[in-house]
């Protein structure tokens, strides 16, 4: 998005900039051009393509309306045919052809580079900060957010589409990372494993009862993002008594795996295992409904709501990118209606834009309190290593 060099430049107008054979309408959004130039369709292009460069004076300017303008300079950016690299975690997934929409609108090709899980994504971005592997990072969640911010690897950017964000996504220094999606890590249980004689647990405290012995599988918080999220949920829920909770849970036969896939499709009933309760996602019952073979009309799983921990995934522009302008456009696209509506059925997360419509399958996504089991990113960063070390001593040794 073009930026005026705004010394002594004020205008109250809409006008035309004529450069050679190209006629481009310039539309002001503020009474003082100290902000940004709005990119709008090329008037010579009936298809309404986006102007793919900044405008640069001198040019012949014809203004309509009241105006009083001084001289200024607008940087020229030729982006048609360029490419940009998006760094992601290995769970990133979008529909085929989605980024073709972005390319058609901007002329920019998106190249995706997966760097492993969220922890590996952040570590690689920090280690290569002077010569980054990409231009934009997607997939930093609130459990690692402060680590990323403290490493000073991002440039601030506030998208014009931020005004469409839903509530409950803010954090400290919110100019540096833009929320893109959110979801919840929750305990899931296999409904048919319970009945009148043994109802499903209604809260986390129930898991300590002997009747639920050896029924739970969790992930190691040192190697798994949902495992860490569930540990944080227990710390918030039980407060200073969280260590004792894990001691009793361990005595009650909790099983620990290294990753989500091993637990959900290994030990949990969904994958042929024997465990009736697993740490997974609030969207997992929806996924079961969609992908069950043979098809089912009602999901075989349900969540234990008071166990949930909210995860928010962010994107940011790497500080030393050589494609700052293209990076801004990509952040804007990640907040577009097209991208936001693609999220649920591909990454099984929720869109952050209030303009995005949900697919039918997600209309019954549980309404979970914003502050349920909440811990600030800064508190997580300060205590994460200590908490996971205590957990390891309590559960694994």
Image (spheres, rainbow, N blue to C red):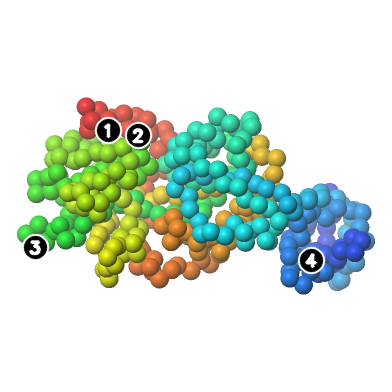
| Res 42 label | 4
- The disc placed on residue 331 is none
Classify mark 4: helix, strand or loop: loop
Q: CA distance from mark 4 to mark 2?
A: 52 Å
Query: Which residue is more in the foreground, 174 or 136?
Result: 136
Instruction: Give the mark, 3 or 2, whose residue is nearer the N terminus.
Output: 3
Quadrant of image for the N terminus: bottom right
Quarter-of-image position of residue 135: top right
Judge depth for marks 1 and 3 and give the one in front: 3
Choose between 119 and 265: the one closer to the eye.
Answer: 265
- Indicate the secondary structure of the residue bearing disc 2: loop
Q: Is residue 78 above or below residue 27?
A: above
- Of label 3 and label 4, which has the lower sequence position? 4
Nearer the N terminus, badge 4 or badge 2?
4
Pointer 1 with pointer 3, Cβ within 8 A: no
Residue 364 in percent (x, y) is at 35, 67
Is there CB contact under 8 Å for labels 2 and 1? yes
Can you identify the residue that label 1 sits on?
A: 391
Q: Say few, some or many: other residues with alpha carbon within 10 Å of mark 3 (under 14 / 14 to 19 / 20 or more).
A: few
Query: Which sits earlier in the primary sequence, circle 1 or circle 3?
Result: 3
Residue name at image x 32 percent, y 46 percent: 261
Task: Identify whether 392 is placed above or below 341.
Answer: above
From the viewer's perspective, tell me whether residue 162 is left or right of residue 34. left
Question: Could you tell me residue 305's position as x and y percent?
Answer: 28, 56
Residue that badge 2 annotates: 222
User: Residue 196's mark?
Assistant: 3
Q: Residue at x 83, y 61 (%)?
A: 11
Residue 119 visible (yes or no):
yes
Distance between the alpha carbons at the discs numbered 1 and 3: 34 Å
């Amino acid at each position: 998005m073009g930026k005026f060099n705004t010394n002594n430049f004020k205008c109250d107008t809409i006008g035309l900039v004529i450069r050679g054979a190209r006629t481009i309408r310039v539309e002001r959004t503020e009474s003082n051009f100290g902000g940004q130039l709005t990119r709008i369709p090329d008037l010579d292009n009936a298809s309404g393509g986006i102007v793919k460069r900044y405008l640069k004076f001198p040019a012949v300017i014809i203004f309509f309306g009241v105006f009083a303008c001084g001289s200024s300079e607008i940087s020229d950016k030729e982006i048609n045919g360029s490419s940009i690299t998006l760094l992601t975690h290995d769970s990133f997934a979008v529909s085929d052809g989605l980024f073709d929409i972005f390319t058609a609108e901007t002329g920019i090709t998106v190249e995706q580079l997966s760097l492993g899980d969220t922890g590996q994504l952040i570590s690689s971005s920090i280690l290569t900060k002077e010569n980054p592997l990409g231009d934009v990072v997607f997939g930093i969640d609130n459990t690692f957010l402060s680590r990323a911010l403290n490493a000073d690897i991002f440039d601030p950017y506030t998208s014009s589409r931020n005004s469409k964000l839903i509530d409950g996504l803010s954090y400290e220094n919110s100019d540096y990372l833009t929320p893109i999606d959110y979801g919840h890590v929750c305990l899931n249980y296999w409904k048919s494993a319970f009945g009148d004689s043994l109802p499903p647990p209604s809260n986390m405290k129930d898991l300590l009862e002997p009747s639920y012995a050896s029924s739970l599988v969790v992930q190691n918080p040192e190697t798994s993002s949902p495992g860490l999220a569930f540990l944080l949920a227990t710390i918030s829920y039980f407060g200073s008594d969280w260590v004792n909770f894990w001691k009793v849970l361990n005595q009650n036969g909790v099983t620990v795996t290294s990753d989500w896939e091993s637990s959900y499709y290994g030990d949990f009933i969904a994958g042929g295992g024997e465990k009736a309760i697993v740490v997974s996602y609030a969207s997992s019952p929806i996924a079961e409904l969609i992908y069950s073979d043979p098809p089912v009309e009602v999901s075989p799983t349900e969540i234990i709501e008071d166990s949930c921990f909210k995860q928010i995934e962010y994107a940011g522009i790497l500080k030393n990118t050589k494609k700052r302008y293209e990076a801004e456009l990509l952040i804007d696209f990640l907040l577009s209606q097209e991208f936001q509506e693609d999220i649920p059925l591909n990454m099984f997360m929720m869109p952050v834009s209030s303009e995005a419509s949900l697919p039918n399958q997600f209309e019954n996504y549980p309404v979970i309190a914003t502050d349920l089991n909440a811990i600030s990113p800064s508190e997580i960063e300060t205590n994460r290593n200590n908490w996971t070390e205590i957990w390891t001593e309590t559960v694994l040794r």
